Image (cartoon, rainbow, N blue to C red):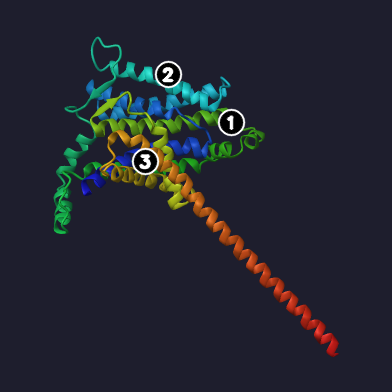
Amino acid sequence: MFAAMFGSVEQGIIYAIMALGVYLSFRVLDFPDLTVDGSFVTGAAIAATMVVLGYNPILATVTALIVGFLAGCLTGLLHTKGKINALLSGILMMIALYSINLRIMGFSRENTISLPNIPLMNDETIFTKFTSYWSTLGIDDTLNGLLSSIGVKFLPQTWGILFLMILITLVFKFLTDWLLQTEIGLAIRATGDNKRMIKSFSANTDYLIIFGLGLSNALVAFSGALFAQYSKSSDVGMGIGMIIIGLASVIIGEAIFGTKTLMRTTMAVVAGAIIYRIILGLALRVDILDTGDMKLITAVIVILALVIPQFFEKRREKKRKAKRYAERMAAMNVSQGKGEDSVAQTGTD
């Protein structure tokens, strides 16, 4: 159980960066961007190809982020300059990226035009580099000693990956908070809320949409690059359903933690990604389910995350209406009582 939870938390933190990207496009820009399914694989393909070719894994990961930004900008250009429907723009870019990703992974092998997957079993990744440094600190022995003292049987070989991912995800979370509170960030948020209004202030909404989608897909591609190095492989089909995972993370986080402030909302998105992976990991431990049911489980989780909050909100609204009705009736009774008292007083006089 602890082993499944530990792996789910690690994957959830990696997916949290992707969920932040989905939050930027769907919630902030109000743009249904399906490029995510392609740009996630693009990030993984870029990172895996460069690692196999001997490049520094940190450089490979940063390059994946830049290429993801360009992919998002192209989606924005299709919509703003090509006047193509927002949903269709994302679909077209997602389809184009499928072939592009095959080509990118083909560069890792000589005389290969396209390649559907790249294994990274014996290659140095950003995680292996950090883990080798982490092991010299001796923190793993201390943490595992504490766990064994309370009866935990599964002890991870290293806590370094978890620590590194928490650090990276928090950096991107706070950078997102900072950006959305800058002048351009406020303009992007205003574009998502009311495009006509922000246009009336002479703002270039086309530029804001392109830039916002670029940032969104940069985060998605960065997450894909990290996931490829974490899972030791890059596959052309690994991005299928990523948009649903991102939406599930956003919806679950917002439903549980709320959206009162910007910083709270972004933290809710991060937490939602972790909770989603934990729920998925626990669901797969049920005997009647297997790994082939992951997409079905994801769909069910999203449906429940959408329906359950509405159910509770309706109940709260009924209670609020009943309370307001009771308060009005009480006020009417009091006013009627005062009126009768005044009439009685007048008759006595």
Q: Which residue is mark 1?
A: 205
Residue 319 on image: x %, y %: 56, 61
Q: Is residue 308 placed above or below 225 in the rendered structure?
A: below
Marking on residue 96:
2
Residue 333 on image: x %, y %: 70, 74
Q: How many marks?
A: 3
Q: Which residue is at a point 84% across and 85% down the rendered structure image?
A: 346
Q: Is residue 233 placed above or below 168 in the rendered structure?
A: above
Q: CA distance from mark 1 to mark 3?
A: 28 Å
Callout 1 crowding tier (Cα within 10 Å): few <14, some 14–19, many ≥20: some
Identity, as a three-letter code, of the amino acid under mark 2: Ala
Could you tell me which quadrant the C terminus lies in? bottom right
Q: Which residue is at a point 25% across and 33% down the rendered structure image?
A: 231
Q: Which residue is mark 3?
A: 16
Q: Earlier in the sequence, mark 2 or mark 1?
A: 2
Work out whether residue 342 or residue 223 is closer to the camera in this orientation and state it: 342
Marking on residue 171:
none
- Give the secondary structure at mark 1: helix
- Give the secondary structure at mark 2: helix
Work out whether residue 166 or residue 94 is closer to the camera in this orientation and state it: 94
Q: Earlier in the sequence, mark 1 or mark 3?
A: 3
Instruction: Check contact, mark 1 vs mark 3: CB within 8 A.
Output: no
Determine the image quadrant of residue 118: top left
- Give the secondary structure at mark 3: helix
User: Given the current orientation, which residue lies at the most extreme bottom position?
Assistant: 348
Identity, as a three-letter code, of the amino acid under mark 1: Thr
Residue 133 on image: x %, y %: 18, 40
Identity, as a three-letter code, of the amino acid under mark 3: Ala
Callout 2 crowding tier (Cα within 10 Å): few <14, some 14–19, many ≥20: few
